[in-house]
Image: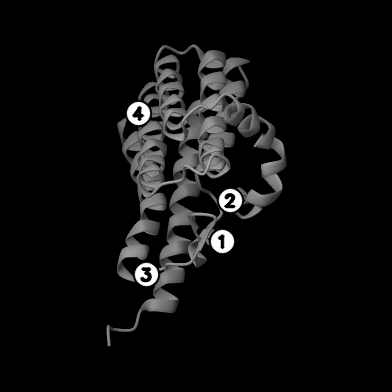
Amino acid sequence: MNLTKKREHLKKVYTPVAIALYKLHLPPNLITFMSVNMGMASAYFFYHEKLLTALIFLFMSGLFDLVDGMVARMSDRASKFGAVLDWLADKWVDGFVLGAVGYVYAGPLTTITVITASMLHSFIKPVVYAEIGYEKREKGKIEDPLEGIGFFGRPETHITLMFFTLLERFKAPIGLEFGIKLIAVLTLASLFLRIAYLYKHYRKEYD
């Protein structure tokens, strides 16, 4: 799937939102914090099984996460701190949302697995930046080979979670218990693809 590879095509969808926020003169880091707050609200409503409300907040959190960097570049306020904050905000939201869904619908083992897989799938990238080193940036964003490796990252996780939330809400035969387990399996498979890629290209010892 890998929607991250189609980032440039998807920008057409959310660029109007970024322009609107830019015209409101909202600081990019504030938009990031708004994304976190919406993500926390989503986790809260998942925990209390208010599924449609949880879905709306999850969608809004993801949307604001997409546009904060774009607003930063539009306003010439992109910063290294903002880039770090964005990483942390994403994983904070994912940990709480996946944790809430797993806790309510799937049990402790699935919850631990899906959170761990999600964290490793993302944080393998900064580890690679530190140990191997990718320095090329396009408009402030690091471009690296791992961007196109794997097929199930954060965008796919959110879309899958929203889809199974709707199934759960409308009493379909399968719902969030199956959905969160599927997310865990697919995220692990995608993580192993990244590990296999790194092993193939960087298994030689240091010179």
In front: label 1 or label 4: 1
In front: label 3 or label 2: 3
- At horizontal 44% and vertical 78% (from top left) the residue drawn is 201
Task: Give the left or right position of residue 63, taking residue 37 as reference.
Answer: right
Q: Amino acid at mark 4?
A: Gly
* Residue of label 4: 107
Mark 4 or mark 3, which has the lower sequence index? 4
Q: Mark 2 Cα within 10 Å, few/some/many (few <14, many 20+)?
A: some
Choose top left, top right, bottom left or bottom right for residue 24. Answer: top right
- At horizontal 40% and vertical 42% (from top left) the residue drawn is 82
**Residues under labels 1 and 2: Cα distance?**
8 Å
In front: label 3 or label 1: 3
Q: Are marks 3 and 2 in contact (CB under 8 Å)?
A: no
Element on which disc 4 rests: loop
Element on which disc 3 rests: loop
Task: Give the left or right position of residue 81, taking residue 64 as reference.
Answer: left
**Residues under labels 3 and 1: Cα distance?**
17 Å
Q: Which mark is residue 106?
A: none
Q: Position of residue 195 (x, y in %)?
A: 41, 65
- At horizontal 51% and vertical 44% (from top left) the residue drawn is 76
Q: Amino acid at mark 1?
A: Gly
* Residue of label 1: 148
Q: Are marks 4 and 3 in contact (CB under 8 Å)?
A: no
Q: Amino acid at mark 2?
A: Thr
Q: Are marks 3 and 1 in contact (CB under 8 Å)?
A: no
